Amino acid sequence: MGLLRRAEMVDGKYLNPVPTTVGGLKLIFRVLPLMIANREERFPHTAPGPFLTDSSVYAQPPASGLRLTWFGHSSSLIEMDGVRLLVDPVWEQRASPLTWAGPKRFFPPTLPLKELPLLDAVLVSHDHYDHLGAETLRALATLQPQARWVTALGVGPILNQLGVPNTNIIELNWTEAAHIETGNGAACEVTSVPARHFSGRSATRRFETLWASFVLRGSAHTVYYGGDSGWWEGFQEIGAAYGPFDLTMLEIGAFHELWHQIHLGPDNAARAYQELGGFPRAGLLMPIHWGLFNLALHGWRQPIERLTALADVHGLKLWSPTPGCPAEVVGEQDIRSEWWKPVP
């Protein structure tokens, strides 16, 4: 399968599918002057919303068979062919190891964790703080004891320390799959596929756990969740091997040319979508990893503004709902919520 192969570990550290440089102390010294001179609106001057999720919606299954609720950034509830999966949940006030410092969310969670419906699985793509919220996981371990937890190699011990029983945890290497079954006979296959990124919950312990993207295949629908990844040549192989998709979820925010190898940004997200097959093979394009935390130097609206412009030029089918709003994925029906636009 060419680039689609299992991850390798060398000297206790996992390797990317292609050679990749992740910045260290030198990058910090390059970024600091840019931050000082930065005049972008990196966080909203007026909090967006309020956004509230009507949890009563979950009492009825989606008529289309596929419904998503995007909670901001990369956190989403995916209801697909009778299976419910929560992806990269972060309900914390900050994407940080500290409660008093670090990137602060732009708007509150759209519903309390206790109002989530019964989950069949929680997916954690990697261990960064904007994808794995410790307090969120502690709460979910208690609130959702029946849920299976699917994650990348090495992340299991972190989940266990936060209260998830080892018997509920499935760690996957790239190209490995987990079979999730529900009590009502529905099922979903979760396959881990390579991504070009890195891991670590501290600056001194990187690459010790794996990072991944996921292919989610139900009885009638298939979704590609890209997780965090920079551009690499494997997108075409992923599309060919695991497509077609009904929905492709790709990151567009927290991007800068200084770290282009580990994050896509809107231009490379559009490129990756086309490499995955474009429409209709890649389905609708859902932008994620934006709109909730200030993690880069660009204006907070810039990623979606740029992707929208690219979609208009290249005819991309965008599926971008309002945060917290359960929305069904139906054929060619795109969604372009404009919740992020300035109020006149």
Image: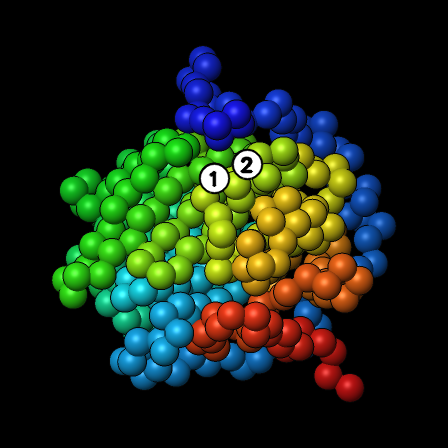
Depth order, front residue of 245/89: 245
Q: Nearer the viewer, residue 6 or 255?
A: 6
Q: In the picture, which quadrant includes the C terminus?
A: bottom right
Q: Outermost residue toward the top?
A: 11
Q: Please identify the quarter of the rendering in which residue 115 is found.
A: bottom left
How far apart, in angstroms, are the residues tagged by discs 1 and 2?
A: 6 Å
Q: Which mark is residue 290?
A: none
For the residue marked with disc 1, what is the amino acid?
Ala
Q: How many marks?
A: 2
Color style of the picture: rainbow
Q: Secondary structure at mark 2?
A: helix
Instruction: Inspect this view and state whether residue 65 appears.
Output: yes
SS for tag 1? helix
- Residue sitting at x 78%, y 35%: 30
Q: Position of residue 6 (x, y in %)?
A: 42, 26
Quick check: 238 left or right of 163? right
Tell me the crowding category of disc 2: few under 14, some 14 to 19, or many 20 or more residues within 10 angstroms, Cα based. Answer: some
Q: Which mark is residue 237?
A: 2
Q: Which residue occupies the foreground of this view, 255 or 337?
A: 337
**Quadrant location of residue 341?**
bottom right
- Any part of residue 265 in sight: no
Q: Residue at x 27, y 80 (%)?
A: 59
Looking at this view, name the residue that lies furthest to the bottom. 344
Above or below: residue 97 compared with residue 104: above
Residue 308 placement (x, y as % from top left): 73, 65
Q: Which residue is mark 1?
A: 241
Q: Are marks 1 and 2 in contact (CB under 8 Å)?
A: yes
**Badge 2 amino acid:** Glu
Above or below, comparing residue 84 to residue 226 in the picture: below
Q: Where 176 sits versus 61, above or below?
A: above
